[in-house]
Image: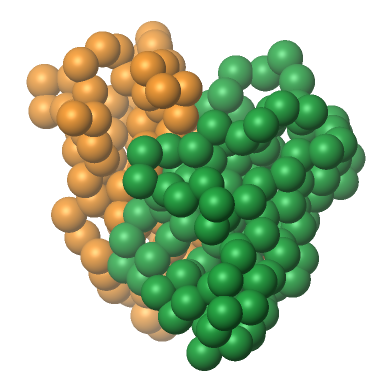
Amino acid sequence: AQSVTQPDIHITVSEGASLELRCNYSYGATPYLFWYVQSPGQGLQLLLKYFSGDTLVQGIKGFEAEFKRSQSSFNLRKPSVHWSDAAEYFCAVYMEYGNKLVFGAGTILRVKS
Amino acid sequence: GAVVSQHPSWVICKSGTSVKIECRSLDFQATTMFWYRQFPKQSLMLMATSNEGSKATYEQGVEKDKFLINHASLTLSTLTVTSAHPEDSSFYICSAREGGLPSYEQYFGPGTRLTVT
């Protein structure tokens, strides 16, 4: 069955440090992959998406993600984290069969000063 | 940008009562709306998909008679939790898709926290 795994429930990084959030997916076809961020009281905001082409995708707020088919991964990265990046991050894959998004469990990012 | 609102943002109700949650697209016409449920430390689970003017399509395992979805206009969908019980306590999130766009182009509301006592 199609699924998305985010191995890390919580991650804490120091402000200014680099960040990598992991995402692995299970999907038979070429995946459409997404990263969303959810701040308290806010809706999910799309950070970036991958459909095809260049496997390194640039998003908003300085985030990027790299699609690695051999590892079934789509990890999110940011070179220097800001305190305002503290939020919950969700990876998702679009299933054409079923016409729906399937989300990972989310990773809560804490930023310490 | 496209904005989706939900009302209320949180609600407490007594067991056995019904509660209605509204989802509105504020600056676009949403031909499709999606309702998700999110448990703590778990992912968003799609409950149902509704197209304006049509009956909602429910995901497997979701009780149609308990979670009533109405999508009567291009800017409003409602989720009614009927005869709520404590196990229905959760975070409910809606999203909306503008007509003509692929289903993965969804705009999400801020969610509604439901607590059933």
Q: How is the image coloured?
A: by chain
- How far from the left and from the top, in percent, is residue A99? 47, 22
**Residue at point 66%, 31% (across, down):** B55
Q: How many marks?
A: 0
Can the viewer see residue A66?
yes
Instruction: Determine the colour of chain B.
Output: green
Q: Quadrant of residue B83?
A: bottom right
Q: Would you say B69 lies left or right of B4 here?
A: left
In which quadrant of the rendered image does the C terminus of chain A lie? Answer: bottom left
Instruction: List the single residue furthest toward the left.
Output: A70
* Left/right of residue A76 with respect to residue B29 in the rendered view: left
> Residue A56, image x and y in percent?
35, 25
In the rendered image, which quarter is residue A54 located in? Answer: top left
Chain rendered orange:
A
Residue A84 appears in which quarter of the rendering?
bottom right
- Residue A32 at least partly seen: no
* Residue at x 66%, y 71% (from the top left corner): B18
Which of A28 and A24 lies nearest the eye of the viewer?
A28
Question: Looking at the picture, how far across and down is residue B96, in whole percent?
Answer: 68, 38
Q: Quadrant of the N terminus of chain A?
A: top left
On the image, the x and y values in percent for residue B27 come to 88, 40
Q: Is B116 above or below relative to A44?
A: below
**Residue under the image location 32 percent in, 20 percent down:** A31
Q: Residue at image x 74%, y 71%?
A: B8
Camera-side residue of B12 and A76: B12
Using the image, determine if residue A35 lies above or below residue B55.
Answer: below
